[in-house]
Image: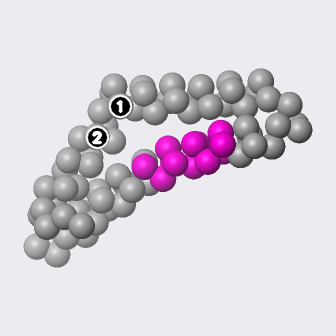
Amino acid sequence: MTTQNPIARGEHAKRLLEDELLNEAFEEVERDIFDEWKKTSSVQHTERAELFHTLKGLERLKGRLQAILDDALVAKSRS
C-alpha cells in the first residue's frame, strides 16, 4: 500500500490508460492470446486455461488502473 496522494496516483493512472504505446501493447498481447487460443484444440485444457488466466490478468491490470483513476475522481470531488 502506498501513501502517495490518491489524486496524484489517479493522474498517473489516467496517463497510463491514455498512453498510446501502452494501449497498443495491451491490444497486441490480447490479440496474441486469442491467436494462440485459436491454434489449440478443444482437448488442450491446460493450454487454454493458461491463456484464459493470462487474459484475465491483463483485464485485471486495466481494471486496477481504472479503479485508481476512479478513486482519484472521488477524492477530487470531495476536496
Quadrant, the C terminus: bottom left
Horizontal side, residue 41 vs residue 72: left or right: right
Amino acid type, label 1 = Leu
x and y, in percent, of residue 42 in the image? 88, 37
Question: Dot 2 corresponds to which residue?
Answer: 16
Residue 57 lies left or right of residue 17; in this view the side is: right
- What secondary structure is marked by label 1? helix
The residue lying at 39 percent from left, 56 percent from top is: 64
**First along the sequence among labels 1 and 2:** 2
Q: Residues within 10 Å of mark 2 (few under 14, many from 20)?
A: some
Q: Position of residue 19 (x, y in %)?
A: 30, 33
Between residue 20 and residue 40, name the one nearer to us: 40
Disc assigned to residue 22: 1
User: Measured along the vertical axis of the image, is residue 71 above or below residue 59?
Assistant: below
Give SS at disc 2: helix
**Where on the picture, by quarter, is residue 31?**
top right
Q: In the image, is residue 19 part of the stretch drawn in magenta?
A: no
Tag count = 2
> Gap in Å between the C-alphas at discs 1 and 2?
7 Å
- Using the image, determine if residue 65 lies above or below residue 37: below
- Mark 1 in CB contact with mark 2 (< 8 angstroms): yes
Q: Height in image: 29 above or below 17?
A: above
Q: Which residues are magenta?
A: 50-61
**Residue 56 lies in magenta, yes or no?**
yes
